[in-house]
Image (spheres, helix red, strand yellow):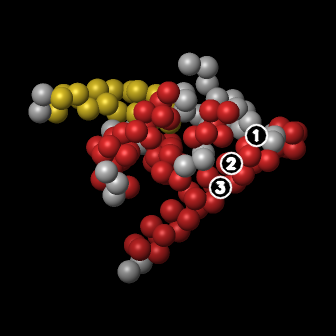
């Protein structure tokens, strides 16, 4: 699938429209992980996390980087593809929904990191 190169790409807007997908992308930008590992980190159900991982994979925002056999099943490992770079001109021309998705995802990641940092101080 063709990589997402613009924030006004409908695939990017759709991916950023759900907070769990934003969090999954943030984790997969830092390391590779399977849906099982993501569900543990995100404290979500495997079914829900797997659904969002499948969606991100279908949208071309993450890629399969490995498979591991685990008790007769195959565990898939993913990592994020490069996020689109945004020039000032591209930002100015982007539709409001794309801007909202981009800003919302950034704020969600900042919130996640701030909460994790605060929890580490306890």
Question: Circle 2 sits in a helix, a strand or a loop, which is it?
Answer: helix
Which residue does the numbered mark 1 point to in the structure image? 86
Is residue 77 placed above or below 39 in the rendered structure?
A: above
Single out the mark in the foreground, 1 or 2: 2
Alpha carbon of mark 1 to alpha carbon of mark 2: how far? Answer: 10 Å
Which residue does the numbered mark 3 point to in the structure image? 104
Is residue 62 placed above or below 110 in the rendered structure?
A: above
Q: Which numbered disc flags the more N-terminal residue, 1 or 2?
A: 1
The reply to whether discs 3 and 2 touch (Cβ–Cβ < 8 Å) is yes
Q: Quadrant of residue 65?
A: top left
Position of 113 with respect to 9 (left or right) is left
Which of 30/112 is in front? 112
Question: Circle 3 sits in a helix, a strand or a loop, which is it?
Answer: helix
Expressed as whole percent of the image width and height from the top left, the position of residue 15 reads: 57, 40
Expressed as whole percent of the image width and height from the top left, the position of residue 71 reads: 11, 33
Say which quadrant the N terminus sits in: top right
Which of 78/12 is in front? 12
Expressed as whole percent of the image width and height from the top left, the position of residue 91 reads: 82, 43
Q: Quadrant of residue 4?
A: top right
Position of 69 with respect to 114 (left or right) is left
The reply to whether discs 1 and 2 touch (Cβ–Cβ < 8 Å) is yes
Q: State the residue at coordinates (37%, 46%).
A: 48
Alpha carbon of mark 1 to alpha carbon of mark 3: how far? Answer: 15 Å
Q: State the residue at coordinates (50%, 35%).
A: 56
Alpha carbon of mark 3 to alpha carbon of mark 2: how far? Answer: 6 Å
Which residue does the numbered mark 2 point to in the structure image? 102
Q: State the residue at coordinates (34%, 54%).
A: 44
The numbered dot on residue 42 is none
């Amino acid at each position: 699938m063709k990589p997402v190169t613009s924030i006004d790409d409908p695939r990017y807007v759709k991916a950023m429209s759900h907070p769990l997908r934003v969090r999954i992308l943030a984790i997969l930008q830092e390391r590779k992980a399977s849906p099982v590992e993501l569900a543990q980190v995100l404290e979500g159900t495997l079914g829900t996390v797997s659904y969002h991982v499948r969606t991100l994979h279908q949208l071309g925002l993450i890629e399969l980087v490995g498979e591991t056999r685990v008790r007769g099943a195959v565990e898939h490992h993913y990592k994020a593809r490069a996020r689109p770079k945004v020039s000032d001109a591209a930002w100015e021309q982007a539709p409001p929904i794309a801007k909202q998705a981009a800003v919302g995802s950034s704020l969600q990641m900042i919130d996640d990191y701030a909460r994790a940092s605060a929890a580490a101080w306890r």
